Amino acid sequence: MSLTITDPAMLATLSTAVGLDLEVRGPDGQLLGCFTPAPRPGMHFPEFGMTDAEMEQHDNDPNAVYVTPEVVMARLRSLRGTP
């Protein structure tokens, strides 16, 4: 089933959506459903909210710091004060 949006304000809001499952709610706050935007040119993974070029720049960032899950868990344990 498809739904045609004719309200300009709603169209503007939905056309700028990024990521997955934007919640659509009624005026009373009730959840009506979720909207997933179609991929845009240069954006093969809209769920990340970044264009392909931005993702490539992020992936190739020489200043990025990557840690293993073990390092993350050790840090979390240290914050909790558990061995």
Image: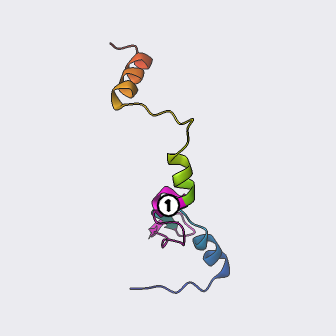
Q: Position of residue 58 (x, y in %)?
A: 54, 47
Check the picture and name the quadrant holding the N terminus.
Answer: bottom left
Residue indicated by mark 1: 19
Q: Residue at x 55, y 38 (%)?
A: 62
Of 31 and 52, the residue lying toward us: 52
Give amino acid for label 1.
Gly
Q: Taking 38 as reference, is 76 above or below it? A: above
Answer with left or right where residue 19 lies relative to residue 78: right
Answer with left or right where residue 36 lies relative to residue 42: left
Magenta-colored stretch includes residue 63: no
Answer with left or right where residue 7 lies relative to residue 72: right
Q: Taking 33 as reference, is 73 above or below it? A: above
Q: Which region is colored magenta?
A: 25-52
Q: Residue at x 51, y 66 (%)?
A: 43
Q: Residue at x 46, y 69 (%)?
A: 36
Of 75 and 60, the residue lying toward us: 60
Q: Position of residue 33 (x, y in %)?
A: 43, 69
